[in-house]
Image: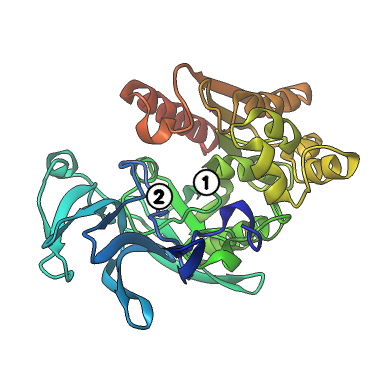
């Protein structure tokens, strides 16, 4: 963790007598960080003693890598790779089992031979739920920002017409070391079904392109913010019938931090929904289950104490810029979220209310950081209802 901080990708190492020797230094993450809200998991591996199987994240999709010991050291072989996401994997001497979903299907169990051949679906748990429903397919958009070649996607409502004006939603992933991909995302599909153009992207700091690309230490609110603004400009350029006065923004965790940051640095969005967010890196450091080491590391501070460190943390805190906010904002938090604790949302809410900015909080009791992915069904429904009604209420023509 010396070169890239606490988010650095782990190496595969060989244990020898009295020492640990790096055997493979990954160019991508050896787990699944492609995200969705219909399946959980991400870390999965298997060994039979002769080879080691693990998931990998390559830019915006997943692969299965196999490692075997050869004369010249540990050799990597890509067994399987395709668009979509994997949330689980295990093996046997002859087969590999996977939990996989693509852009049009919710996760199911698949299997294939150990060499990657004969990939086939085993279960059909979700076919009935999707039957006859419109599913928006992601339209890829390539763009450049701050010297990086970046990629995003747009979901269009059913019967999309260039002659009609549409509201839109920018959805920002968490992490920041996660990645969007061409995979089914329920909340986005719901908003597309309700008539919104939904757009999302992998900015600097996202996973799948190595540690250097993912490293945004001491740059939170810098390159990442500009990437999102440039992507929004590109989407509006490609789809001029999106009403620029009816564009919403939302995100959770790091995406919640970025939502808080955005509303303090631009008023281009008609409303915002900030979920399980970070607003103050100083208080975060003393309340979050990872705060004492994650906050300073990611913001370029040497620690939590001392005036210089406090200034660094405060400069990267959205709360510092709350006096600039004009955007109506909904806050979603869970009272058992120890990763991004409730006080982070409360501080930002209070700051907006003190300035007369329209704001609301919806607090979920008994839920944690995983509300949107594994919360109680009634709470997941209520969460989406709150966000959707907030968007619809602020985008009426």
Q: Quadrant of the N terminus?
A: bottom right
Q: Position of residue 58 (x, y in %)?
A: 41, 66
Determine contact: label 2, label 1, CB under 8 Å.
yes
Answer few, some or many: residues within 10 Å of disc 2's Cα (few below 14, many 20 plus, some between 14 and 19).
many
The residue nearer to you, when weighing 153 against 240, is 153
- Residue depicted at x 17% and y 49%: 109
Where, by quadrant of the figure, is residue 295 drawn? top right
Sequence-first tag of 2 and 1:
2
Residue 244: where, in percent of width, then height? Answer: 58, 52
Q: Which residue is mark 2?
A: 35
Residue at coordinates 58% horizontally, 44% vertically from top-left? Answer: 254
Q: Quadrant of residue 303?
A: top right
Relative to 217, 43 lies left or right: left
Where disc 2 sits, the SS reads loop
Q: Residue furthest right?
A: 307
Q: CA distance from mark 2 to mark 1?
A: 9 Å
Q: Circle 1 is placed at which residue position?
A: 174
Image position of 219 (left or right of 376): right
- Residue 48 position within the rendered picture, expressed as x and y whole percent measured from the top left: 21, 59
């Amino acid at each position: 963790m010396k070169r890239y901080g606490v988010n650095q990708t782990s190496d595969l190492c060989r244990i020898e007598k009295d020492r640990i020797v790096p055997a493979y230094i990954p160019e991508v993450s050896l787990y699944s960080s492609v995200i969705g809200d219909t399946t959980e998991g991400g870390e999965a591996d298997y060994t039979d003693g002769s080879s080691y199987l693990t998931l990998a994240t390559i830019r915006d999709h997943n692969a299965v890598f196999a490692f075997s010991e050869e004369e010249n050291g540990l050799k990597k072989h890509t067994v399987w790779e395709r668009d979509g996401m994997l949330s689980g994997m295990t093996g046997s001497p002859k087969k590999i089992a996977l939990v996989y979903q693509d852009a049009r299907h919710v996760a199911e169990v698949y299997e294939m031979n150990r060499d990657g051949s004969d990939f086939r679906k085993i279960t059909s748990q979700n076919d009935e739920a999707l039957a006859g429903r419109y599913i928006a397919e992601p339209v890829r958009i390539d763009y450049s920002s701050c010297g990086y070649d970046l990629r995003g996607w747009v979901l269009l409502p059913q019967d999309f017409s260039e002659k009609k004006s549409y509201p839109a939603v920018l959805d920002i992933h968490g992490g920041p070391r996660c990645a969007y991909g061409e995979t089914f995302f329920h909340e986005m599909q719901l908003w597309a079904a309700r008539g919104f153009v939904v757009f999302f992207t992998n900015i600097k700091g996202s996973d799948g392109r190595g540690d250097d690309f993912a490293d945004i230490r001491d740059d939170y609110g810098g390159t990442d913010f500009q990437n999102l603004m440039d992507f929004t400009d590109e989407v509006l350029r490609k789809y001029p019938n999106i009403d620029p006065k009816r564009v919403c923004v939302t995100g959770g965790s790091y995406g919640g931090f970025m939502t808080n940051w955005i509303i303090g640095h631009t008023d281009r969005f008609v409303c915002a929904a900030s979920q399980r967010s970070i607003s103050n890196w100083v208080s975060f450091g003393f309340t979050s289950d990872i705060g004492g080491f994650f906050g300073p590391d990611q913001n370029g501070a040497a620690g939590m104490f001392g005036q210089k460190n406090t200034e660094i943390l405060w400069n990267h805190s959205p709360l510092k810029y709350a006096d600039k906010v004009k955007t109506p904002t909904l806050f979603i938090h869970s009272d058992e979220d120890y990763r991004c604790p409730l006080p982070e949302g409360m501080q930002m809410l209070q700051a907006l209310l003190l300035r007369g900015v329209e704001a609301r909080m919806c607090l979920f009791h008994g839920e944690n950081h995983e509300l949107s992915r594994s919360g109680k069904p009634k709470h997941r429904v209520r969460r989406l209802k709150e966000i959707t009604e907030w968007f619809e209420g602020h985008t009426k023509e």
